[in-house]
Amino acid sequence: MGTLFQLAARNVLRNKSRSGLTIGAIAFGVLMSLLLGGFVSGIGTNMVDDVVLGKVGALQVHLRGYDDVKDNQPVHLHMPVHGEVVDKIRAVPGVTGVLPRIVLAAMINNGTSSTMCVVVGADPSLEPAVLPLARRGLAGQGNEAAAPHRGVLGFELAEAMNVRAGSSVVLQAATANGQQNALDLDVGGTTNNSVPFESKRMLTVPLAFAQELLQLEGRATEFTVAVADREKVLAIAEQMQAALGPAYHVQHWQQLRPAVVDIVTVQRIVLFSICIVFLAIAIIGVMNTMLMSVLERVREIGTMMAVGVRRGVIVVLFLFEALTLAALGTATGCVLAFSLLGLARALGGIPLTPPGSAMVLYVQPIAPVWLLGLTAAAMFVGTLGASAYPAFRAARLRPVEALRAT
Amino acid sequence: MALVELVGITKSYELGRTVVHALNGVDLQVERGEFTVVMGPSGSGKTTLLNIIGCLDRATAGTFRFDGEELGDRDFNDLAEIRNRKIGFIFQSFNLIPVLNVTENIEFPCLIRGDPKKALRERVRQVAEEVGLGKFLAHKPDELSGGQRQRVAIARALVTQPQVVLADEPTANLDSGTSEQIIDLMLELNAKENVTFLFSTHDPRVMAHARRVVHIADGRLVDGTDSGRAEVAAVAGMGAR
Ligand SMILES: Nc1ncnc2c1ncn2[C@@H]1O[C@H](COP(=O)(O)OP(=O)(O)OP(=O)(O)O)[C@@H](O)[C@H]1O
Ligand SMILES: [Mg+2]
């Protein structure tokens, strides 16, 4: 076995330019696959971060029934901000923070015109721990507990209402028991959101403002929950649901934002297809190289057969040669890919502007381990598959004819 | 019991509508320790004959016994094993493995059958010494002359201690001086170590050295299976002219 491997390695070195070219093709395939994979998964991570760390949290808890009417921003299904429910949520292992929020629909009025908007009230002192990216894209002052009558408007909403930091607007909404109420709000800043709807229709206020507007002192309509490990969110959701009982409804971010899951899945499928094309090109290169090296070594194969090499050993020899090429190419591709991805991260990420937004996101490209494993596995399996034909062709040669070859 | 025994061996190739009879009823016996020259013009069937004896090819008809066994029903791997253990090959075009150096080329047939490497190295050195390659152990084939390459091939054929060494026109690619040396080497190995040689050639000069010559023409052995000493001497005289 050792002898065979040595022989295979030397045969690879024999035609240096051809082997180099093949290794280069494999390396290129692996490199492209990992670079694209790193980029796409960086975008995916960004999108999921935006949702989990900036908008909905890892999990949300509502009263049961909220979900059926949530598009109307119902405010009659509220829970106490302090008490048994929050304590139970906090007690679930893996939970790192709970943020009480109220989501409501309101009219915003600048004195001359008014429009519908969605208001999110969240406790500013708890927010950074639960939604650390909530303030991404903020221009001006963010929400503070100490300034309960100051809020942040979506960038386009502020433009449409012709207000800026320092202006003031009136918010009008129906309270939990159906009366109309209005409250002045100072504009502290604007936020440049990557999602068009949120930029056009949303504003955020301190929880206390929302409570006052709706006359819901000490209450919230939802709890946004942060967890230590995002991968475990499904198990945590299950455990939390069990702890809270049927009166409450626990949902994880994938249920809350299924579109994001879909987009990430589609991105992965596209990525896969492109990777397969790159890898296929590399594998065809291997097949070509192996066929050529079989054809130009026919007499040598005949000689080996004459001195007693079995057919299976000939197959193994050529498979070893192909695997050596694959291993060298894959290793080269990985080193290049990880260096380039590392460099991109060291330079601060790849700047990207999502469509419909003026905000620049910095994508941190990281090739996930599973992609590396998959690429390497595809390369090895593909190489074995591609070299099987040349190898068997070599082994099927008849010794007399092989020896007659020039 | 003869080491090699051919009775009525024929080998024919179908080429389209015509059938080429490369061998046409060959009877031949080779005894252990013999040095036999198969002599015949180009196309007479020498290579075909040696390939059948070397278990590289099968006869179309006839009986072939090697070391007392009929091998007609053996599969590829069985025959590979027999070639490896019992037969040494020397080819006209040397057929060394270019990526292996002299030592590695010589030990190759032993390594593939799993001989332990340590004891092998010593034996390889001995054999290399015997064929006069003691100083070239680390050389690659392309760093050697034709004669030296053929010596490597001889060493590779001998290292497995085969029952017979088949040499198909081993001197055809060598100049006459080198040819003589190679033939002398084989004769010496035959005399000293009792290695059985079957040697094909179309060069009449080789007969000067031969102890037994069989003539082949058009796939048939001419005048029986053995030629007498007298004829050998006569042709040797002709070759020397
Ligand atoms: N594979 C084959 N297909 C068809 N005919 C063949 C084949 N191999 C050999 N022959 C024919 O068989 C005959 C004997 O060939 P062989 O190679 O044994 O001759 P040879 O004595 O070794 O000749 P040389 O001295 O040129 O090597 C020739 O007529 C040749 O054309
Ligand atoms: Mg021939």
Image (tube, helix red, strand yellow):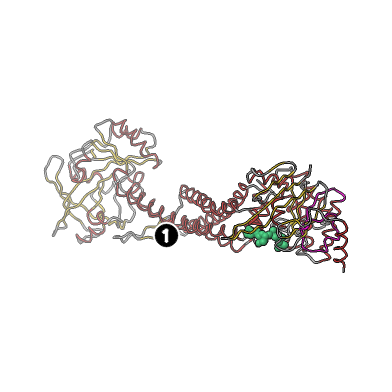
x then y, percent, for residue A392: 56, 51
| Side (left or right) of B48 relative to A91 | right
Give the chain of mark 1.
Answer: A
Query: Residue B191 appears at what percent x and percent y?
Result: 87, 51
Q: Quadrant of residue A103?
A: top left
Q: Is residue A308 left or right of residue A169?
A: right
Would you say residue A183 is visible in this rendering? yes
| Magenta part of the chain | B191-215
For the point 41% across and 41% down, which residue is it? A229
Q: Is residue A144 above or below residue A166?
A: above
Residue A297 seen in render? no
Residue B177 vs residue A71, the one in the foreground: B177
Residue at 20% across, 46% down: A71
Question: Which quadrant would the N terminus of chain A be assigned to in this image?
Answer: top right
Of residues B222 and B101, the one nearer the viewer is: B222
Beta carbon of the mark 1 residue lies under 8 A of ligand 1: no
Q: What residue did someone put label 1 on?
A: A350
Nearest to the observer: residue B181 or residue A138: B181
